[in-house]
Image (tube, grey):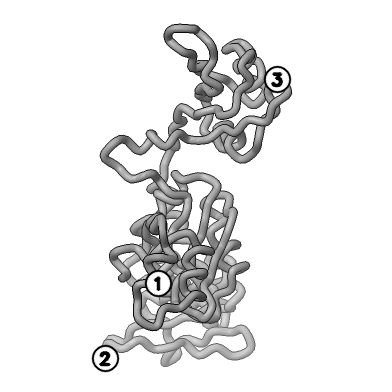
Amino acid sequence: MTECYIRVAEDENEEPMEIPSEEDGTVLLSTVAAQFPGACGLRYRSPVSQCMRGVRLVEGVLHAPEADWGNLVYVVNYPKDNKRKMDEMDAASAVKIKRGIQKTSDLIVLGLPWKTTEQDLKDYFGTFGEVIMVQVKRDAKSGNSKGFGFVRFTDYETQIKVMSQRHMIDGRWCDCKLPNSKAGPDEPMRSRKVFVGRCTEDMTADELRQFFMQYGEVTDVFIPKPFRAFAFVTFADDQVAQSLCGEDLIIKGTSVHISNAEPKHNNIHHLFSNFPGRSPSLAAMFERSQYQFPSSHV
């Protein structure tokens, strides 16, 4: 039998690619895998039953159904683990696209020495990257520094780097972060923590950390004990956390839902003490997580 080509695609609705057969009419699995990495077989839809049928595979060789490949489109089979990873990658890519290009914000610099000037701030923060603006807040009457100021960078990555560490400015440790007013007067303060719902018991804190690190730096992962089918993940950047809210992501083959983690009640122990059969351990769990259930999950 002379060499022929069979039509192969990853999905029935995709445009197929022609794969060459061997002289005896068979197709090597390695030939398919060269074009579709990770492929472990082929299947096709029967013209008679309209059901999917598998192509016989013997020692790495695919054999034509009824001795003729015909003009059918053969769909690539992948191992379940590979498909799961591909689904997770697709979900991750979709969220990254959603995030898009991040814009920089004014950062508040707390704990400034009284003697620090705007030039001092510019010289110091200029070592991290290009500075757009610096300002030291001063008293309108005396002109004395109020002990804090603002800085803004050109690059978002520089902003993240600056926020992730403390700064020694003129002999004093200072903190640099997004101001609470960034959210606006009618909006809640933006949180760096997200609620991960629909978790399964086999998910570990390390696995959640590794998964969410693809979106940004993770500073904490908390899974309540005993298991409650949810977890909390905290990011270094609140914009990363907010970009994930509302997403359904696939972790270990399970679809989990990401939502806002609402700030805890100011008097959480008092809140729990009002419940019959109050549990100190439950109150401690919420104290540890620093957040209550999102309203959509209560």
Question: In the figure, 92 relative to 44: above or below?
Answer: above
Looking at the image, can residue 134 be seen?
no
Marks 1 and 3, the one that precedes in the sequence: 3
CA gap, disc 2 and disc 3: 82 Å
Circle 3 Cα neighbour tier, 10 Å, few/some/many (<14 / 14–19 / ≥20):
some
Nearer to the camera, 189 or 164: 189
Looking at the rendered structure, which numbered label has been put on residue 170? 3
Residue that label 2 marks: 48
Q: Secondary structure at mark 2?
A: loop
Indicate which disc, 2 or 3, sits on the residue closer to the N terminus.
Answer: 2
| SS state under label 3 | loop
Q: Residue furthest right?
A: 171
Q: Nearer the viewer, residue 271 or 90?
A: 271
Q: Report the residue marked by disc 1.
A: 273
From the viewer's side, name the closer residue of 217 and 45: 217
Quadrant in the picture for the C terminus: bottom left
Identify the amino acid type marked 3. Asp
Residue ID at (58%, 31%): 158
Gap in Å between the C-alphas at discs 1 and 3? 48 Å
Residue 155, how many percent across, how many down?
A: 53, 29
Q: Is residue 220 above or below residue 285?
A: above
